[in-house]
Amino acid sequence: MRYIRPLSIEDAVGELAKAVGPAAILAGGSDLLVRMKGGFIEPELIVDIKAIGGLADITETADGFRIGAAVPCAVLGENKAVRKAWPGVVEAANLIGSKQVQGRCTITGNLCNASPAADSVPALVAAGAKAVVAGPSGKRTIAVESVPTGPGRTSLAKGEIIEAILLDKRPVHAGDAYLRFIPRTEMDIAVVSAGVNLTLDDKGAIKTARVALGAAAPTVLLVEEAGQVLVGSKLDEATLERLAKICSGACRPIDDKRGTIEFRRKVAGVLAQRAAAIAYKRAGGK
Amino acid sequence: MAGVAVSTTINGDAVEYLCQPDETLLEVLRDRLGLTGAKEGCGTGDCGACSVIVDGRLVCSCLVLGAEAEGRKVETIEGMAHGDQLHPLQQKFIEHAALQCGICTPGFLIAAKDLLAKNPSPTEEEIRFGLAGNLCRCTGYDKIVRAVQDAANVMKGA
Amino acid sequence: MNFDPRFTGRKFSSVGTRPLRPDGIDKVTGRARYGADFNMAGQLVGRILRSPHAHAVIKSIDTSKAEKLAGVKAVITAKDLPDLTDGDAAMYDILDNSMARKKALYDGHAVAAVAAIDARIARQALKLIEVDYEVLPHVTDVDEAAHHHAPLINDQVFTEGLEEKPAKPSNITKRTQFGHGDVHKGFAEADFVIERSFKTEQTHQGYIEPHACVASVNPDGTADLWVCTQGHFVYRQHCAQLLGLEASKLRVTSSEIGGGFGGKTHVWAEPVALALSRKAGRPVKLVMTRDEVFRASGPTSATSIDVRIGAKKDGTITAAEATLRYSCGPYAGSWAEIGAMTAFACYKLENVKTVGFEVLVNRPKTAAYRAPSAPMAAFAVESSIDELAREIGMDAVDFRIKNAAQEGTRASYGPVYGPIGIGPTLEAVKKHPHMKAPLKANQGRGMACGFWFNFGGQTCVDLNIGMDGSVSLAVGTVDVGGSRASLSLVAAEELGIDYSQLKAIVADTSSLGYNDMTDGSRGTFSSSMATISAARNAILILRDRAAQMWDIPVEDVVWEKGHAIAKGEKYGNLSPLSLKDIAAKSGTTGGPIAGHSELVADGAGVSFATHICDIEVDPETGATRVIRYTVVQDAGKAVHPTYVEGQYQGGAAQGIGWALNEEYIYGKDGRLQNAGFLDYRIPVCSDLPMIDTQILEIPNPNHPYGVRGVGETSIVPPLAAIANAVSNAVGVRMTHIPMSPPRILAALDAEREG
Amino acid sequence: MVEVTLWGSLSTVAGGKAKHDIEAKDIRELFRKLAEQYPGIEPWIDRGIAVAIDGTIYRDTWSKELPEDAEIFLLPRLAGG
């Protein structure tokens, strides 16, 4: 087993590409070390990406924000500009684990761990976030929802690293929100969750909407129909009811130690309603 | 398996050690350096008993590799008191009986120290959510929350 | 020793105060040493290989590859722990649980172990051990296991306690029955009868410190064991018997214990560590992972309970009946028996009958968990009592007050009560401001009562007086939550000296006579009795030494407020001698001064509590939140009230966790799905409100200070108190614990759909 | 002579009778005489039986005297947490 701390993304990609045995990327380690402890993965190479220039930075660009892959969620939460523009994404990121885990975990890691219950992912998908992927054949930018392909599986090829997550600049009258259901008040994995991202027109009607559900299917679900039903509305009761129905219907959940199919279906709808109401209010809707 | 040579700072002292690439900081502290104040309650970041502060960030040392401590500043429970002067949190934990078995206490103290550093006047709710990453099975948390509240008051006055 | 344990009603100067605990600084600075904090020179790392099957015959184990791995110093299987139990069935079960002999009986059952120079090699070695299993059908549910078609876990088990020995083996090891009167007659007299069935899932004690020990066995048969335990003397007996060692040559030192709650009352991996050390010829440290703690230690019973209670219109209960089925894991136990004893203990009943069935399942061996078996029975009974009160149209508290047991009542488990606290706790609850606190929409208030026995048992204390007048107190009951502070207070009280003059320690097994373990709420009750006795013995010597110093008859010397006083006018010129004065001269008055005590602390009281809680339910998601919580409990005499409060609060919090979210979840394959703190959800800080406490003091007549045990009872009422609160908040009666959000939401939906 | 009451299950190995009159001065003698009369009780005594004398439970003090008019009740010896 080797532990390396490359200083450039090219070196990191090169090492990963030529690795013979299983290799693991280490940023926050809050998933990786747990999997190593449980004997689920025994990497021969651990590539610590935290020393790579720029990966620990949040930068505000003309197009929005670039959040480096090694930015801990606690640091993201302390960034006022991101918090103001994307409160739903930030609150989702800040729900991952405990304060202790917050000091380490990253949204990129959360995405690449490819758990259907990942907290930040539904919010990122609703936000239309993109991932910048560096690999042996150069860089590409992809929608975050195309990263996870199933529980624990991603579309990333050997040698590829996500180096940053991109969030768009916000228009006026925009808001997002994320809610999850957990049995306790902290420390749990989402039983089911919902992220909603809205923009409003000048009259307060919803102009665009994206709704994503977590822990409701093998990967995070972008429920396009749920977004469509919101467009044009001012979130009246009938719309909310339709939203819940669509979200519950879109779920393809399982029975497991965290919840039942019936529970997840029902609560997915409830959370979508509640998240939509918060996002609407944040966007300035009344 | 090649050992990793690490130079780091622990409780203000320069420390060097050699560790395995997959060895956690908790294992290094406990098994190599004899700093057994941080406890392993779960090894998966779910109990907070191994809490330490690395470069000003509260972390579970079971979720940090020993190799990652290179060039960092690590604070553990062993460095919390100043000489024979207990930290106000330590004093208040004893006064309020905020511990029964005491196994979670080092982790709680480190987490509470980090909480008060970032928020010197927390509400009860902020304390409760701020310490939610630390499990205690003995106290029901009541006396822990009171000890932190009292320590916060003392520290503000100081 | 002539020791009079009767309550004297004395006035206290130290007992009842709240000084700082003697082990506080060690525990806030990280210096206190727990099970895993100790190391020996040349120590190896021990690891255990565990069965991945719920039920399987172990056809063969090939350890040869593991033995050849460089760095491996010993590999053991059941062969290395031969059966020395000599017909002692309970010890055989402990042995088989430590290392499976013929069959693996649950997911996580130990089948082999290694000792290696480091953890990585030990882990690798486990992978090289080849176990050939023949997988058998399994059963994990208590009701399914009790069914006659269920896979048999042990074909030698024929239900005990039946009129005739059954013809066929069964998973039901024992039937027990308690009660008196005639329940048929009682139900015939009832105007209202409530009949309900309940289920509770299996929970774990959830101590934060995993089991850990360091074992060192020498070729001459002497050995040392450093271990976190609730009873190091008991561990010594167990290990000596299982390893064939002489008890007095095995020194067991109890480390600081990071929680036990009943889960550290018998050995698990300790015999394995000793056997590894014996084979390797080196010390072995064995620390369980959290996963192992959940899969292979601890848990309480899962239960299924039927309750029937009848009452007249005026609120008098005429009959009460319960059938209780408790899982024991794969070994016989007496868990339903305790449930059957405690179920109706709070009430004055003319006609009562309880029947318990002990049921084997392919789950870990059931261990005691704080007032073991009582919370589940109380959940069933106290939920039904609330329903009955509602049917009759009586207030829940008044209904209980009307039927509460009192001094002279025949307990449902048999004997007649002495002075007890159930009535006073109910009266205190009735008057408590909590009962008047406003409730909002979707919030409800519930209350419930709980009962638990207290234990006494064998106990030793040594009290040594230093030449400078300081006093050391060596006790043999492990300090699980501040007992060194309370026992120091008791010694200070008896000697009449200041608390700060004392230091209490927990002595190892070679330094003190045998002690039963810290269980059954006995730590402070028993060791305080022995401490009082030891102090009184020391005072006899102190008086004698003072008499020598004064050259007067010892009969003329009395002990008052920490001083020897010469009694009688003729001694008017003799100023009192302090303990310190006498100690300073001890070298020339007969040598060291000490007081010893070896006794059986019998006559423990019984303990009652009543809890109130307010719960808010989110009717759309089934989520619950505890808004307010109050514990009222009888302590007999609170020696250190702060730590008594701590016991009340801690028990309540564990009960809340059990009521709402904690449960063992097994898959269809019989494997445990949630062996970690992530998905075995114990309450976190933000889940709970402040937990208000009220200590009542109804003295135990059989303790000099009136002390009763306080450790366990507080876990008994919460399950029912919360179920009653949920019922009052949203109108659904939850009969399945934990009341997790999916269960509550399903119940609400069923109610809404009519 | 004292009157002793056995709990339900124990009475199944004592001729199905819950109440027994026994000439015994202390707990030790009581156990001995019960075992003489009902050999099936012996394993139960080995496993542990507690004796409630006027409501006070004795688990280990076999020298405890049994007053003539006392209420004596046998109980299983329990496990605690």
Image (cartoon, rainbow, N blue to C red):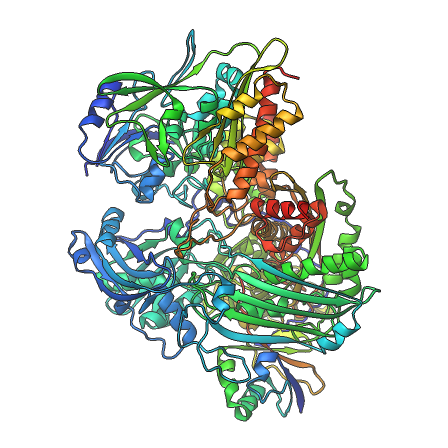
**Quadrant of the snapshot with the N terminus of chain A:** top left
The residue at 54%/43% (across/down) is A262
Near-viewer residue (A248 or A256): A248
Residue C527 is situated, as x and y percent measured from the top left of the image, at 55, 64
Quarter-of-image position of residue C305:
bottom right
The reply, left or right, for residue C422 in relation to residue C669 is right
Residue C87 is situated, as x and y percent measured from the top left of the image, at 38, 79
From where the camera sits, is residue B88 visible?
A: no
* Count of marks, rendered view: 0
From where the camera sits, is residue D21 visible?
A: yes
The reply, left or right, for residue C132 in relation to residue C408 is left
The residue at 57%/66% (across/down) is C526
From this view, report whether residue C674 is shown above or below residue C457.
above
The residue at 57%/63% (across/down) is C304
Residue C714 is situated, as x and y percent measured from the top left of the image, at 62, 56
The residue at 62%/87% (across/down) is D17
Residue B145 is situated, as x and y percent measured from the top left of the image, at 59, 38
**Quadrant of the snapshot with the C terminus of chain A:** top right
